[in-house]
Amino acid sequence: MAGLPHNKLALDPALVKLGNMKQNRYKYFRWTKHTATVTFLAVIVVPGICGYLGYKTDGLWDMRAKRRGDIISER
């Protein structure tokens, strides 16, 4: 009784196919120029840009305990 599937609604074949495709995506993955470019951008370039900007602006602004008229730049 508890192990039987009790589907009240009919399953949409397109959604079932999409779910199966998402579960088995790793089986059909191939490295192409596009996937390599996207991976390189997501893993190397974006964190590098964020790190560079963080390093360059570290200590540049101080927002703590400022009142109206005080400057926020530290350099």
Image (tube, rainbow, N blue to C red):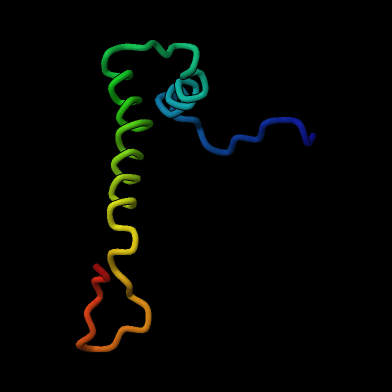
Q: Residue at x 28, y 52 (%)?
A: 56
Q: Is residue 65 above or below residue 49?
A: below
What percent of the width, then of the height, locates residue 5?
Answer: 67, 31
What percent of the width, then of the height, locates residue 39?
Answer: 35, 25
> Left or right: 10 with respect to 34?
right
Choose between 19 and 5: the one closer to the eye: 19
Q: In the figure, residue 12 lies in which quadrant? A: top left
> Left or right: 49 with respect to 24?
left
Choose between 65 and 13: the one closer to the eye: 65
Choose between 26 and 11: the one closer to the eye: 26
What percent of the width, then of the height, locates residue 38?
Answer: 30, 26
Q: In the figure, residue 48 lies in which quadrant? A: top left
> Left or right: 44 with respect to 21?
left
Q: Residue at x 44, y 11 (%)?
A: 28
Q: Residue at x 23, y 84 (%)?
A: 70
Q: Residue at x 28, y 49 (%)?
A: 53
> Left or right: 11 with respect to 60?
right
Image quadrant where one finds the N terminus: top right
View extreme (bottom): residue: 68
Q: Is residue 34 above or below residue 3?
A: above
Image quadrant where one finds the C terminus: bottom left
View extreme (front): residue: 75
What percent of the width, then of the height, locates residue 2?
Answer: 78, 36
Disc tally is 0
